[in-house]
Image (tube, coloured by chain):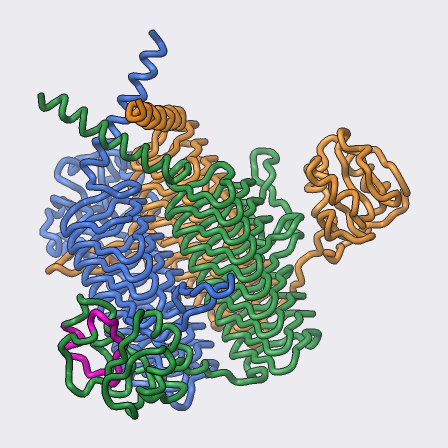
Chain colours: A green, B blue, C orange
Amino acid sequence: VTDGAAALSAAEVAASVGGELRGEAARLVTGVAPLDRAGASDLSLLAGARYAPAFAATRAGVVLVGPDLADAPGPADVVRVVVARPHDALVALLPRFQPPPTRREGIHPTAVAAPTARIGRGVSVEAFAVIGDGADLADGVWVGPHCVVGDGVVVGPETRLVSQVTCYPGTVLGARVTVHAGTRLGSDGFGYAVADGAHRKIPHVGRCVIEDDVEIGANCAIDRGSIDDTVIGAGSKLDNLVHVAHNVRIGRHCLLMAQVGVAGSSRVGDGAILAGQVGVAGHLTIGAGARLAAQAGVISDVPAGETWSGYPARPHKDALRASAALFKLAAARRGDRAR
Amino acid sequence: VTDGAAALSAAEVAASVGGELRGEAARLVTGVAPLDRAGASDLSLLAGARYAPAFAATRAGVVLVGPDLADAPGPADVVRVVVARPHDALVALLPRFQPPPTRREGIHPTAVAAPTARIGRGVSVEAFAVIGDGADLADGVWVGPHCVVGDGVVVGPETRLVSQVTCYPGTVLGARVTVHAGTRLGSDGFGYAVADGAHRKIPHVGRCVIEDDVEIGANCAIDRGSIDDTVIGAGSKLDNLVHVAHNVRIGRHCLLMAQVGVAGSSRVGDGAILAGQVGVAGHLTIGAGARLAAQAGVISDVPAGETWSGYPARPHKDALRASAALFKLAAARRGDRAR
Amino acid sequence: VTDGAAALSAAEVAASVGGELRGEAARLVTGVAPLDRAGASDLSLLAGARYAPAFAATRAGVVLVGPDLADAPGPADVVRVVVARPHDALVALLPRFQPPPTRREGIHPTAVAAPTARIGRGVSVEAFAVIGDGADLADGVWVGPHCVVGDGVVVGPETRLVSQVTCYPGTVLGARVTVHAGTRLGSDGFGYAVADGAHRKIPHVGRCVIEDDVEIGANCAIDRGSIDDTVIGAGSKLDNLVHVAHNVRIGRHCLLMAQVGVAGSSRVGDGAILAGQVGVAGHLTIGAGARLAAQAGVISDVPAGETWSGYPARPHKDALRASAALFKLAAARRGDRAR
């Protein structure tokens, strides 16, 4: 179903994953698809016993199967490759099948690039993109359709802004960064001083710095710093709809899952993992390697390496214990009433 | 205040809703507005006793009133239509008053459509839209301004992308789908394999499939599948800022309210209702017709037809009982200290 | 580091903040930066003892320091300005250093404005913006790149839509409003009536009204009303990724922090503060000046002036007491088991 970047024979598949070939060695596959949607030129996998019915009816050309399901009933002409961990094997093969995304070098005639912008070699700027005064696009940068790269923004080599991305002035992107559709970088932080009963805006002059090898999902919002910078550390990955406030520092190789919010001036240590919908209050420190369970509401510092959960977030073991005690209490009260 | 698609007389209003006309039968209304903003050509409603002051001062032409408020003091020249459920009656009449949205057929001269794209009959493509190589727009499709329809994307008949919508390659939309402004369909899922201390991206080759009659709100993000597809079932409705991760399957006629997040590979059964800010962890099954209360944090399977709430989510009755027990305990401790 | 709008001497800085000058009065600063990134022409601040090492190594030209750190070891050529509250002093000076954003008056040649739109004096419409039939842009309005201003939308004087903002038909913006990138105003609310097992869309004819001096962050979604209007009161400020449903009324001078969601027809009183990720259920009233703690899940009315937290939200003192009682209970149970 996918347009294969290349064709692989069943023998090459087996050799590549260290599996045992059962069937026609010369069978060619050019794409990857699930059992129920695969055709004769697709590689698929039998990921567990619950998929046995789909396997029995599949039209896939080659299927990766685990040792326990090596003899599962299936069509006679399906080539099987028996391998210890079929899913991992498929993931390892995926890059061979993914076509490189279509990319046209140069500046699309509809794009508007300021004459003062610096455009490196091998840069692509797609339809209707806007490149501001003094922006600096390094070699190999790829700016997708409808992106807005503000005045003076710096974009490092091989970085890709997928589409409809906004980089406010004050944004600095490193090398090999990917920013998905609709994400806003460097917007003003939420800072006001109360004067005469109204909220007066505090100017923001800090930067929004995205370091090398970061990937940011769709429709996120990462503010610029007020005086200091907002920084996303090298190698960190952000999922969709994540909010990062002004002056926050996210460390290196962190994972922030969907809909996480980190309030102003908090710091997240290297390798920390924030699961979906986690909220971190302002001016806190999350230690390196800490893990925050989904929906955790963090209102105090979290030590390095610990796992916290709940609201207000506490060490996960304590939170589990408290939750268990509560439900026992409720059950006991109910028993009292029943007596 | 609204530009009426048509003019209705008070007699026609009364007949249409099965109400009792009190006043000038020939009075014409062309729009709908609340009591405090309505003018002589507007239809309005008196929705309850707390709106009596607004009714007393209204300049509306015709007002729907319930039997209990049929004689509420009001301007002599306001025509009343007495009906059992005024709000439902007004909702039923709304389509008569809503002007059809302005739509210009054809491809706007500023849009960029690949020569290899297939454009059906009666298609509208608005300003600055981008249609990729091999994209397929069925009859009656309406692509709003600044939308990006990626290479090979399939859009079914009468489907509308309102504006600034992104469809990544691998997205397939059914018939009569509406996607609101800024929503991203088919973005890469959040999948990484750790290698040498860094997160290596797992390619995504599954599709993002939106079935018939789905409506998706503004600024949502729905990822494509990794190997399998992500699917939003026919007739389901998603509110604003919803996140749906890779490989998720949402059933038919589900409601996902604002800011809901569903993590990877989870399945939501037909007719389930997920209230605002609900989070569902990965690889779970939410049964058909289940209801998840607002902000529920679901970390285990939910049986069909049940209502769950809280974090970690439990059956709603248990959660209520636990919450009551806790507050009684806290009060008792306080009483102890007071003694 | 920032391009200064003006140069200030150290003497002028000291006079402006009422501080004591220690060092060269004529030293000029043209920008603001944190200690570790500042150069000779930057103003910085020593915000507390933990920044003493950064101060010792700074290359800043002028540094604001508090009385307690006035004699902290630092480079001899750094000019110090001793002032009671260095951070407040810096915030007060920031507007002097922020360059005015680059703005080009007139309609960019790539923008598409309907001939029936009314364009005031001194209006800027940037690249690829779309202005609909009968839209009304008052004097001094600034419409950024890729914005879509729908048919009949009214935009008040000096209001700025930063970029990629959508205003659906039915949107009315007051004076001096700022709307950040990717925010959607006036999208259809989430309203369906069930008929024959399917969800039938209820038309929305109410407006989305944004009053004077409101600022709205990036990637928010504010629906239009169904019959009544959705209103954001004058002077209120919304952070990023906020959702406001149909018919909601937010009062004046409220603060809604990131990822807040307010469900349909709820009312939030003047001056209320909703911290990050708060959810308010439908048809509720939040009193004036109420404060909702981060992640609070509100399912009942909140009296004016009170602070509530948790899910289901309760008065903050009660919630704290309950949380403390629970963890004591869990510890006691643990003690029982240990004995």
Give residue C111's position: percent from left, percent from top.
53, 73
At a point 32% along the width and 21% down the height, the residue shown is B330
**Residue toward you, B102 or C287:** C287
Any magenta on residue A57? yes
Vertical position of residue A93 compared to residue A262: above or below: below
Quadrant assignment for the C terminus of chain C: top left
Q: How many marks?
A: 0
Vertical position of residue B99 compared to residue C287: above or below: below
At a point 59% along the width and 68% down the height, the residue shown is A149
Image: magenta residue range: A53-69
Give residue A339's position: percent from left, percent from top.
9, 21
Give residue C62's position: percent from left, percent from top.
81, 45
Vertical position of residue A268 compared to residue B102: above or below: above
Residue extending farthest to the top is: B339
Q: Does residue B38 appear in this view?
A: no
Side of C321 where C142 appears, left or right: right
Q: Does residue C305 appear in this view?
A: yes
User: Where is residue B321, by image quadrant?
Assistant: top left
Vertical position of residue B160 compared to residue B331: above or below: below
Quadrant assignment for the N terminus of chain C: bottom right
Side of B7 where A317 appears, left or right: right
**Residue toward you, A334 or A225:** A334
